[in-house]
Amino acid sequence: MKPMKLFSLLISIIILNACGGPKEPSELFEIQLEGKQEKFQLGQTVGVALKNKEGVTIGGVTYTIDGKELSKSDGKIIMEAEKLGAKKLVAQIDMEGKTVSVSKNIKLLSNASPEVYTYEVLATYPHDPSAYTQGLEFHKDVLYESTGKKGKSTLRKIEYTTGDILEKIDLDNTVFGEGLTIMNDKIYQLTWQSGIGYVYDLESFEKTDTFTYGKSKEGWGLCNNGTHIYKSDGTERIWFLDPETLVETGYIEIVTNKSIFNRANELEYVDGKLYANVYGKESMMIIDARSGAIEGVINFGGLKKKIEKSADWDEQNSVLNGVAYHPGRKTFFVTGKNWDKLFEVKLLKKSNE
């Protein structure tokens, strides 16, 4: 190669390196939203613009959330998604015969505030006050319960009208029992921080398998809709588990019209809704199982005052926890950690007046 050509090539390489080479889309473009907002409600119309930092020629822009294109008109988009929570708003840009994309983190919330419910006690039944209740579920008029605390964690089969324990399995002293659910003639039970769950045969009441957690680091509550299992883990997420493999296949995030919420504990599924105890509170959420929107809040204030405190009572931790729906009676049953009573209740929507 001639010296002059070699010199020209070296100069070109130096200039290219000095310029940093081809720029990333995020260096060229930025999504700008009306009012510099980061929180939006479902269905909200928002002004949007694409900042073209270096005046690059582009053919067009589309905006998506979770891969679904958003409606756009007159420089505004409509915030839509099947699932709510923390999202990425993505701008797909036609540029020089190819498509590039940039994104912006947003929070997509519910477009309605939760309705407020109270309750009516229909009946009261005895409950073992030594039971640190973590999971509760009916199957064919029989109540199944999971209890916690290391050295006291159990799985129980109970005659709910008398409180008699029909069968019981004691968990290893090293684990802390958590939620349970029943599906396809199997009982699934979580532990708290051990990263392991158990599978039992419903008929024989014997442990048949174990499973480990994925991205959900802890075990809190379980329920199912007949197709897949829902699992809470103490975060804003409720996970979907494949009932055969117990692998996490997705999640929803729990939201109100104002914020993302992270206190769901024990779970129950009824007609497309998740009923979830609020950890440490005398209340329960009604969550849309598809979107994650909190549609209702049930105030169970006053229920704890009906409990006779036993030797196992812990003023800080003996809180409301445990919700089971009885399909035949079409009523809910609730109790708490170390409560001596199980309450059959009817939920009542409070008037706006």
Image (tube, helix red, strand yellow):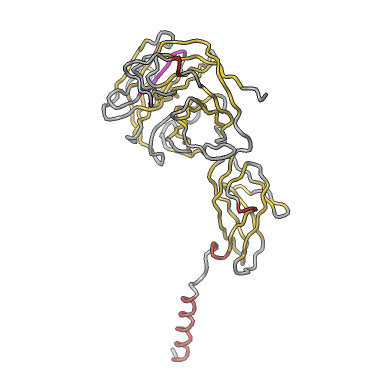
Between 57 and 39, the residue placed more toward the observer is 39
Q: Give left or right: position of 108 versus 149.
A: right
Q: Which residues are magenta?
A: 140-147
Give the main secondary structure, helix, strand or loop, of the magenta stretch.
strand
Q: Is residue 97 magenta?
A: no
Work out which residue is located at the far right of the displayed protein and give it: 74
Q: Tell me residue 243's x, y (percent).
A: 44, 31
Q: Tell me residue 175's x, y (percent).
A: 30, 30
Q: Residue at x 43, y 29 (%)?
A: 280
Q: Which quadrant holds the N terminus?
A: bottom left
Q: Which quadrant holds the C terminus?
A: top right
Residue 324 in the image: above or below residue 74: above
Number of numbered tags placed on the structure image: 0
Q: Residue at x 38, y 28 (%)?
A: 178
Q: Tell me residue 6's x, y (percent).
A: 44, 87
Residue 169 in the image: above or below residue 83: above
Q: Is residue 144 magenta?
A: yes
Q: Tell me residue 331's x, y (percent).
A: 54, 16
Work out which residue is located at the far bottom of the displayed protein and give it: 3
Between 33 and 4, the residue placed more toward the observer is 33
Between 17 and 201, the residue placed more toward the observer is 17
